[in-house]
Image (cartoon, helix red, strand yellow):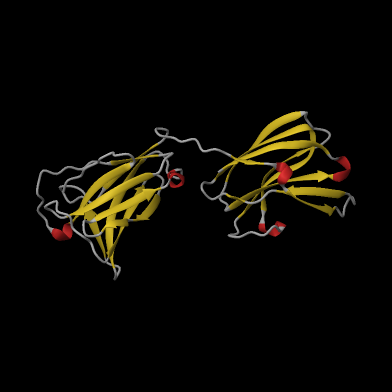
């Protein structure tokens, strides 16, 4: 079996042969590993061939790629997308967001085919019928800047409540919800001006379709400005690592002691 890595744009071509279709290879053959880059979408195309390097269609079978990091004890399985069943051409795509979850490291990989009855057959990538090859994930080689989402606090939805303890009215303003499941990292940069007084909160939700009620949201981080710690102008950040589906921002003001302004909120996931 011939292993060919062709770096054409973002594509990597990789040839595999199934042991079922012969135990004697038409040499010469060689095996090379695959390199994936963080920060971009990566595509790997697989050509399924027999021991004579002829295209071999695997009809009525699904094909899967297993990627294992033994050091981190993690396993990722990706299903092949069929490009041309007759020619035995398949493709696996790793999105830019999926690549963020890969630590820069060398991963062990195998490919197997599963028939309609659930029986599995390994596919092989070397002259010694070795089913194992390696995928190297590289960080910072082709990294792409991801812009932040800019929120305008003046457009937040307004509401209020009366505090039962002090009898004071508190006004609060809530942003629309933001999709937050691409990574587990959540960063917000918030700028306050003119001696702002109030509490600023970043909230998260694990509900697939959360309501505006407080029960569907939990506090991720918050900061409060009072008469004791107020500043003329300041930009601060929330940096948190956790899993959630949605994020929203809220600021709360004591009506009798309102002052200042939130000029900008930037969020990145």
Percent coordinates x, y for residue 182 in the rendering: 51, 48
From the viewer's perspective, is residue 254 above or below residue 116? above
Percent coordinates x, y for residue 127 in the rendering: 15, 47
Residue situated furthest top in the rendering: 232
Q: Quadrant of the C terminus?
A: top right
From the viewer's perspective, is residue 231 above or below residue 122? above
Residue at the location (37% across, 55% down)? 77
In the image, 61 versus 184, the foreground residue is 61
Q: Is residue 42 toward the left or the right of residue 126 in the image?
A: right
Residue at the location (72% across, 45% down)? 155
In the image, 58 versus 110, the foreground residue is 58
The answer to which image quadrant residue 56 occupies is bottom left
- Res 239 visible: no
Percent coordinates x, y for residue 22 in the rendering: 12, 57
Q: Is residue 2 toward the left or the right of residue 217 in the image?
A: left
Percent coordinates x, y for residue 153 in the rendering: 71, 42
Count up the numbered dots: 0
Residue at the location (73% across, 43% down)? 154
Residue situated furthest bottom in the rendering: 117
In the image, 54 versus 122, the foreground residue is 54
């Amino acid at each position: 079996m011939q292993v060919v890595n062709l770096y054409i744009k973002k594509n990597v071509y990789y040839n595999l042969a199934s042991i079922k279709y012969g135990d004697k290879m038409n040499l010469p053959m060689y095996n090379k590993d695959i390199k994936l880059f963080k920060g971009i979408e990566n595509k790997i195309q697989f050509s399924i061939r027999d021991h004579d390097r002829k295209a071999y269609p695997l009809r009525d079978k699904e094909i899967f790629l297993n990627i294992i990091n033994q050091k981190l004890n993690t396993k990722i399985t990706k299903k092949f997308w069929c490009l041309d069943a007759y020619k035995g051409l398949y493709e696996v795509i790793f999105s830019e967001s999926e690549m963020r979850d890969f630590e820069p490291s060398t991963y062990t990989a195998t490919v197997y085919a599963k028939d309609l009855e659930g029986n599995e057959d390994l596919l092989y990538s070397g002259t010694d019928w070795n089913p194992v090859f390696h995928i190297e994930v590289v960080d910072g080689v082709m990294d792409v800047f991801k812009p932040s989402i800019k929120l305008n606090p003046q457009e937040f939805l307004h509401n209020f409540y009366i505090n039962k303890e002090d009898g004071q009215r508190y006004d609060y303003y809530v942003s629309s919800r933001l999709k937050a499941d691409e990574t587990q990292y959540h960063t917000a940069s918030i700028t306050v001006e003119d001696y702002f007084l109030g509490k600023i909160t970043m909230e998260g939700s694990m509900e697939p379709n959360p309501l505006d009620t407080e029960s569907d949201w939990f506090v991720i981080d918050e900061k409060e400005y009072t008469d004791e710690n107020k500043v003329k102008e300041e930009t601060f950040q929330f940096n948190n690592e956790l899993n959630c589906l949605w994020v929203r921002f809220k600021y709360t003001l004591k009506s009798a002691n309102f002052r200042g302004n939130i000029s900008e909120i930037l969020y990145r996931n």
